[in-house]
Image (cartoon, rainbow, N blue to C red):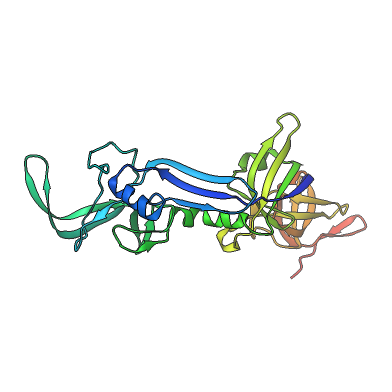
Amino acid sequence: MADEIDIARQKAYKKINFNYEPSESFMNKQYLGIANHEYGDLNYELQNDGEEYTIKVPFENLLFQKFTGTDLQVGYSLQVGFDNYIPKPVVLYDYGTVTATSFKINDGSTTTTATSYNVFGQDTNISGVNWSINFGAEQSSFTNFIETNTLYANYYDDYITNIFSIKARIVSIKAMMPIPFLSALKLNDRLVIRDKRYIINSYSTNLITGEVSLELLNDFRIASDAPAPTNEWYELYNCADGTISNSQSYTIGTFAINERVTSVGNTYTINAVLTSLPSGSLLAITTTGETGCPIVMGSETIFYTLY
């Protein structure tokens, strides 16, 4: 598949930043003064020669306050001087309905008493597991625990850790690829080339020549994190002339080694199972229910089934 391959060292990032928009809430300002970073942000600086990796979302991350001895928490759109302000868009998790010590709600004219409410904030609970909308591990205003199931931990940690591997390399490939393969290729796919797994950094296609340029990064993430393959290809041995061809993609286990198949009037046996897309024309095959090539004696063809 690959016509040209270049390998270069992957430069590790010198700064990693995961940030919300700065909040004007007096709660957030007080936290910033103590922790020296915005609540929910994650920032790390290293002595490396790479670029900065920055994710910044256009939302404000209000730090809530839970009243002592209750399960009631509130967020404030109040600045340090307790002047109200309109925050930037705020994204909240829904923790669900909880029963709290009774509290009063006044709508400006009427006061009512409530004993339960729907909790919104940085946390949610799914099947008994807490998840946080923060990037970094922070003490939750609601659970009062440091919540580690963060956006960074769940969606970025494996990728960033992979880049900092001492074995990480940028592999640039130029190749001619089948149109069906290209049309199905996505940037979050993992490619297997010569039994090595890669992440796609970028790729471009020359629509005139059909040549594809891929920039790949070695994928050292543990195999259990990788999506399990569902398809395979087959190397075919032509029973008539001994030439080798390859099949189209089929669900894993569709055919077996030495199984006799046919394609466009020719008879083949399965010579090998392939786990990555082979080059060249790919054949659609049909099983005969037999194994091995037919034995030819003179002008008469005799078929045998092996058990």
| Furthest-right residue in this view | 298
Q: Quadrant of the C terminus?
A: bottom right
**Res. 227 in view:** no
In x, y percent, where is residue 56?
Answer: 46, 42
Looking at this view, is 9 or 216 the one in front?
9
Looking at this view, is 83 or 264 the one in front?
83
What residue lies at 23% left-to-right and 38% top-to-bottom? 84
The number of numbered discs placed on residues in the rendered structure image is 0
Q: Is residue 142 left or right of residue 238?
A: left
**Res. 209 in view:** yes
Q: Is residue 83 left or right of residue 113?
A: right
In x, y percent, where is residue 76?
Answer: 25, 46
The relative height of residue 228 versus residue 110 in the rendered view (above or below) is: below
In x, y percent, where is residue 4?
Answer: 79, 44
Asked which quadrant contains residue 59, the reply is top left
| Furthest-top residue in this view | 208
In x, y percent, where is residue 103?
Answer: 13, 54
Looking at this view, is 190 or 282 the one in front?
190
What residue lies at 55% left-to-right and 46% top-to-bottom? 53
| Furthest-left residue in this view | 110
Looking at this view, is 103 or 24 the one in front?
24
Q: Is residue 98 left or right of residue 235?
A: left
What residue lies at 66% left-to-right and 40% top-to-bottom? 203
